[in-house]
Image: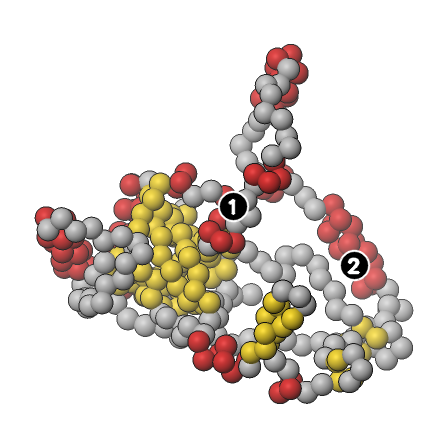
């Protein structure tokens, strides 16, 4: 099945804007999932929202509850939350570059392939890819998807670019409280030597295809056997989704030179643009 873009917009490096689209790098349907079915009727089980002592309730009567101390909830109308949701900003601006090793694996959340939307965008796309590859850097920026602003890291990936959403700092749990009881004494020399030899003996290039999910394989065999058995009861279900459309492009060399000139004049003035600051005015390429 053809991949569908989950986001379309502009990848921006200073004055250079490149129309791109994001495609999920992982497959949500790669593992088997089940739906609860009512055995006697063969129909899917639906979940009805209900309140203890009241019974089923209407969606329009449901509020958002934020839990406060002493089991108290602060009630918000869903419309109030919708009013402050970020609009789907169609720009991912690279505002900072860091070495790949500076970002802890704890921060990485979900990967997406970044693809140019048309042939006109490919030249600029390749320049950004090759510049990141040559410098060994990762680009950082933020984009909005589904009403939420994501911190993102952009890096080369084969012939293209890979974008990974990152967790924010307040989403990372401190490890020290969990590791504090582990003594920091040195390991026994002989035991350490044996463990090191075992690691070296089992060291090999990473190959994800060498690892198989044995439970998933057994489950697929069971399903296949059941599928061939005409006595196995069956039920029907359907799903749907809709694609989107995208944008336009740039004079690459002129924009790059203008960006370089602008950054040079800024550095002469003793000012540096940090990742947290946002420019109030921007020249358009």
Q: In this orientation, which residue lies closer to the viewer: 284 or 124?
A: 284
For the view shown, which residue lies furthest in the front direction? 70
Does residue 245 appear to the left or right of 214 in the view shown? left
For the point 68% across and 87% down, which residue is it?
A: 58
Quadrant of the snapshot with the N terminus: bottom right
Query: Vertically, is 139 above or below 28?
Result: above
Q: Identify the mark at residue 76; answer none if there is no mark.
A: none
Front residue of 63 and 197? 63
Residue placed farthest to the top in the image? 190
Residue 122, can we see it? no
Q: In which quarter of the image is the C terminus?
A: bottom left
Q: Quadrant of residue 210?
A: top right
Against 152, residue 38 (above or below) is below
Image point (18%, 63%), residue name: 251
Q: Which of marks 2 and 1 is in front?
A: 1
Q: In this view, does 89 lie to the left or right of 265?
A: right
Disc 2 is placed on an element classified as helix
Q: Does residue 271 appear to the left or right of 235 in the view shown?
A: left
Which of the 4 image quarters holds residue 125?
bottom left
Give the class, few, some or many, for how many residues have Cα within 10 Å of label 1's Cα (few <14, many ≥20).
few
Earlier in the chain: of badge 2 and badge 1, it is 1
Image coords of residue 188 (percent x, y)? 64, 15
Report which residue position mark 1 lands on. Answer: 106
Identify the secondary structure beneath mark 1: helix
| Separation of marks 2 and 1 at Cα, in angstroms | 38 Å
Identify the residue at horizontal 37%, vertical 70% (top origin).
89
- The residue at the point 80 percent across, 73 percent down is 37
Horizontal and vertical percent position of residue 169: 46, 51
Q: Which label belongs to residue 224?
A: 2
Residue 47 percent location from the top left of the image = 74, 77
């Amino acid at each position: 099945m053809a991949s569908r873009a989950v986001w379309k917009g502009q990848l921006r490096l200073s004055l250079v804007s490149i129309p791109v689209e994001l495609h999920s790098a992982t497959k949500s349907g790669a593992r088997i999932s089940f739906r609860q079915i009512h055995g006697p009727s063969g129909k899917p089980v639906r979940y009805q929202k209900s309140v203890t002592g009241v019974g089923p309730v209407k969606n329009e009567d449901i509020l958002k509850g934020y839990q406060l101390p002493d089991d108290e909830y602060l009630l918000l109308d869903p419309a109030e939350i919708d009013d402050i949701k970020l609009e789907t900003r169609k720009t991912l601006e690279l505002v900072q570059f860091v070495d790949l090793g500076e970002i802890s694996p704890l921060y990485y959340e979900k990967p997406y392939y970044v693809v140019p939307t048309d042939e006109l965008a490919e030249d600029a796309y390749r320049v950004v890819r090759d510049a990141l590859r040559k410098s060994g850097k990762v680009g950082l920026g933020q984009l909005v998807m589904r009403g939420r602003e994501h911190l993102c890291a952009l890096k080369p990936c084969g012939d293209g670019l890979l974008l990974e959403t990152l967790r924010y700092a307040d989403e990372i749990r401190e490890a020290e409280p969990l590791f504090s009881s582990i003594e920091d004494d040195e390991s026994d020399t002989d035991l350490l030597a044996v463990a090191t030899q075992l690691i070296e003996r089992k060291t090999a290039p990473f190959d994800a295809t060498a690892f198989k999910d044995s439970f998933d394989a057994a489950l697929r065999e069971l399903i296949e056997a059941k599928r061939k058995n005409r006595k196995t009861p069956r039920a029907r279900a359907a799903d749907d989704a809709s694609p989107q459309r995208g944008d336009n492009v740039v004079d690459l060399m002129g924009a790059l030179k203008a960006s370089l000139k602008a950054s040079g004049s800024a550095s002469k003035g003793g000012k540096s643009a940090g990742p947290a600051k946002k420019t109030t005015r921007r020249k358009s390429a």
